Image (cartoon, rainbow, N blue to C red):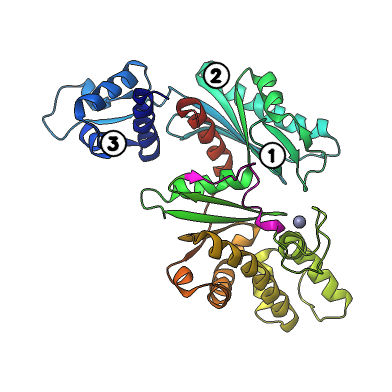
């Protein structure tokens, strides 16, 4: 990349992350001489990518005018395929949601049915965008399973069995005429956890994603770590009980097979079958019900403690290897709240170096139901504008 292009990317990345900045702020940030920075700013302005809204009117004589990205220069679509349906959004250049649709999951007994859900969401967004459809420049897709990021192929999603070996990128491109990017949902969620905490985001965040499976994501200084073949942070497949239940990956005792929401349900069924008194816990319990139940029932308490220990074991590996500033718990276990974060801290204190745990923040995610699709849209925006 040429030096000028490099500088323009640095300026644009800063504006996309921070929303706005003045010329002096950008000069200070780049540590490059002002005239060179101003030339790059003018080129971005001429291309219609950034603007100086305050300069349009009369000069006020106040502080330096602010620069920001033009809201309509890059609209993108974000989609998330998940267990309970498919969510779609259209966002503007700043990542603001303009339209949103949540489509409930249908039968999903064949690949065709899953694809139909995605196409229906796409059609709804096209209808909503209407005459502004031409502003949309790409589609970002948050995939529920294993992904070949480079080739935009969905390899396998445990919870949506027909969703395997799908050329998702090509499928979206031929349905919309737009370029598409495909990323694993854990990675997409992790990026949003970071963005939501700006401007005071921690330097590094490990995100434990607990939906029916268990995944993870790691972001440092705004950069996601994906590993050399895109398979990093598969915390769900760390073996926590060598003789534990068989995991869908073929191994035994993976975190995902013993301590995922599905693993928890299995543990409870096993305990019931062994005659443990779990009276009072309904068949289809929520996480909140489970926590309340476990606080007053010995059998429930033992299962809850085991669950926390298994999660902490896998997380201790993460803490020892990555030394993150923050761990975020997202997905279904997020509703275990302080019960889980307190237990994790206690366990991590026993397993890790004190220096790595003392300053470690453990938080519960506060992403809403459309934030993952929104994050996918913003990742596609960055690929288009910055070449990420
Ligand atoms: Zn496994």
**Predominant SS of the magenta segment:** loop
**Residue 186 shown left or right of residue 165 in the figure:** left
Q: Which residue is mark 1?
A: 147
Dividing the image into four quarters, tell me where ligand 1 lies.
bottom right
Q: Position of residue 341 (x, y in %)?
A: 55, 69
Identify the residue at image location x=14%, y=24%. Answer: 59
Sort mark 1 into few (<14), some (14-19) or many (20+) by Cα contacts within 10 Å: many
Q: Is residue 95 magenta?
A: no
Query: Is residue 85 visible from the viewing direction of this image?
Result: no
Identify the residue at image location x=18%, y=32%. Answer: 64
**Residue 179 shown left or right of residue 284 in the figure:** left
Range of residues picked out in magenta: 223-237
Identify the residue at image location x=82%, y=43%. Answer: 161
| Label of residue 30 in the image | 3
| Contact check, label 3 and label 1, Cβ < 8 Å | no
Q: How many marks?
A: 3
Q: Residue furthest bottom?
A: 298
Sort mark 3 into few (<14), some (14-19) or many (20+) by Cα contacts within 10 Å: some
Q: Vertical placement of 120 versus 81: above or below?
A: above
- Secondary structure of the residue carrying tag 1 is strand
Q: Quadrant of residue 202?
A: bottom left
Q: Position of residue 13 (x, y in %)?
A: 39, 34
Q: Position of residue 335 (x, y in %)?
A: 60, 62
- Secondary structure of the residue carrying tag 2 is helix
Q: Which residue is mark 2?
A: 133
């Amino acid at each position: 990349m040429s030096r000028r292009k490099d500088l323009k990317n640095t300026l644009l990345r800063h504006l996309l992350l921070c929303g706005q900045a003045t010329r002096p702020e950008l000069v200070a940030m780049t540590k490059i001489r002002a005239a060179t920075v101003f030339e790059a700013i003018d080129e971005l302005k001429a291309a219609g990518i950034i603007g100086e809204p305050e300069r349009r009117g009369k000069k006020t004589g106040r502080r330096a005018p602010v620069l920001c990205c033009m809201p309509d220069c890059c609209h993108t679509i974000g989609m998330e395929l998940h267990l309970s349906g498919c969510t779609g959004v259209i966002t503007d250049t700043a990542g603001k949601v303009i339209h949103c649709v949540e489509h409930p999951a249908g039968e999903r007994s064949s690949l065709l049915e899953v694809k139909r859900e995605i196409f229906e969401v796409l059609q709804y967004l096209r209808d909503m965008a209407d005459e502004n459809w031409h502003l949309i420049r790409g589609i970002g897709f948050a995939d529920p399973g294993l992904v070949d990021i480079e080739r935009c192929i969905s390899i396998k999603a445990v919870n949506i069995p027909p969703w395997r070996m799908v050329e998702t990128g090509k499928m979206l491109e031929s349905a919309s005429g737009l370029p598409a990017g495909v990323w694993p949902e854990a990675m997409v969620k992790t990026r949003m956890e970071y963005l939501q905490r700006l401007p005071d985001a921690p330097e590094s965040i490990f995100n434990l994603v607990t939906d029916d499976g268990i995944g993870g994501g790691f972001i440092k200084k705004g950069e996601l770590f994906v590993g050399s073949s895109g398979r990093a942070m598969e915390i769900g497949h760390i073996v926590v009980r060598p003789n534990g239940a068989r995991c869908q990956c073929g191994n035994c005792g993976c975190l995902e097979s013993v301590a995922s929401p599905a693993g928890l349900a299995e543990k409870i069924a096993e305990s019931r079958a062994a005659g443990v008194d779990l009276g009072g816990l309904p068949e289809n319990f929520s996480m909140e019900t489970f926590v309340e139940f476990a606080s007053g029932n010995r059998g429930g308490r033992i299962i809850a403690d085991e669950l926390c220990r298994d999660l902490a074991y896998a997380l201790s590996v993460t803490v020892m290897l990555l030394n993150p500033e923050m761990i975020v718990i997202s997905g279904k276990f997020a509703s275990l709240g302080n019960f889980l974060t307190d237990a994790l801290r206690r366990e991590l204190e026993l397993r890790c170096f004190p220096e790595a745990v003392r300053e470690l923040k453990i938080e519960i995610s506060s992403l809403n139901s459309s934030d993952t699709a929104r994050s996918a849209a913003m990742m596609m925006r960055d690929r288009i504008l910055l070449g990420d």
